[in-house]
Image: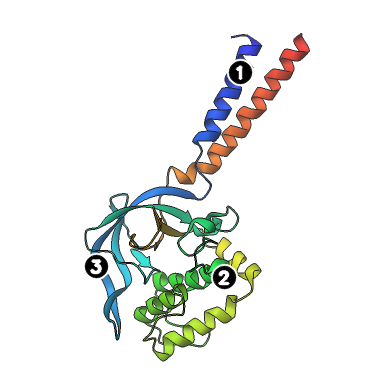
Amino acid sequence: MNLKAQGLAAVAASALLCMSAPAFGQTTVSVGYTGGYSTTWGNSGGDYGAGIYTGTVNGVTSASGIICDDFNDEIASGETWNAKAYQVSTLVSSGNINNTLFGNPSNPNNIGVTGYAEVATLVSMMFSGGTSYGGITGITQAELSSAIWDITTPGGITGLDSIASALVTAVEKAFGGNVSAATTYLASLSDLWILTPTPLGPGEPQEMWTENLAVPEGGAALMYLLLATLFCGWAFFLRNRERAGV
C-alpha cells in the first residue's frame, strides 16, 4: 500500500473509531425490577416499597441492589426497561448530568449538581449501611428513602418523620448553593452509577442507582479515545511523509 493509500486508510479508521466510541462514563443497559425491597415507608398515601430493591442489570442480578430516587413514577414486579447508565464521577465533567432525570435544565424538577450530591450522599449511606450523618443517629433505610424522594419532588413529600426531615436539612446545608463542593464530591464517586430510563417522561420507569456496574462497553471509552488519537497522529504523520516525498 502506498503512502497516500495508507494516509487515507488511517483517516478513515480514525473517523470510524471516533464515531463508534461511547461517551465517557456512560453506557446503555437493560434494568429489571424483580419485586423485592429491603423495607417499606408509609404516609397518608399508603405504604411504599423502600430501601434497596432487588433488580437486574443486563439480565444479571445486581449484587448491591438498586435504589430508587423517583417518587413520581411507578414500576411493577417483573418489569424491565432500557436505561442510560451514568458513572457518578463523570456527571459534571462530561455533562452527563444534563441527561439524568432530575438534572436536565429544561425539567421543572431539576435539582442540579447540588441536588444530586445530596441524593448521592444518602444513596451511599444506604449502600454502606450507614445510620448516622452530621450528628443525626439511628437513621433507617426507610428514612433515607423518604429523604431522597423529598429532595427530588418539587415541594417535597408529606409524611417525613423528624429524623428524615433533619437529614434533608443537613445534606442541603452541606451542599446547598456550593456547586464547587458538590462537583468535587460527585467526582469522587467512581463506584456509583445512575440508571436513567430511556425515554424520559411521565409514566416512564423510575430512575435508579447502583454500585460497581460492570460496563465493558462504556468503561472502555477512554481506550477508544486513546486509540482514536493514535490513529489521527498516524494519519498526519503519513500525510506529512507523503508531502515530503513529493
Image spot of residue 108 (x, y percent): 50, 68
Instruction: Name the kind of residue labelled 2 in the image.
Output: Thr
How far apart marks 1 and 2 lie (CA) works out to 47 Å
Mark 3, residue position: 36
The one of 186 and 137 positioned closer to us in this rendering: 186
Element at label 1 = helix
How far apart marks 3 and 2 lie (CA) works out to 30 Å
Q: Residue at x 57, y 54 (%)?
A: 95
Instruction: Name the kind of residue labelled 1 in the image.
Output: Leu
Q: Earlier in the sequence, mark 1 or mark 2?
A: 1
Q: How is the image coloured?
A: rainbow
Split into 4 quadrants, where in the image is the N terminus? top right
- Residue 114: image tag: 2
Instruction: Name the kind of residue labelled 3 in the image.
Output: Gly
Split into 4 quadrants, where in the image is the C terminus? top right
Q: Quadrant of residue 176?
A: bottom right
The one of 124 and 115 positioned closer to us in this rendering: 115
Image spot of residue 197 (x, y percent): 38, 56
Q: Nearer the viewer, mark 1 or mark 3?
A: 1
Q: Is residue 34 left or right of residue 228?
A: left
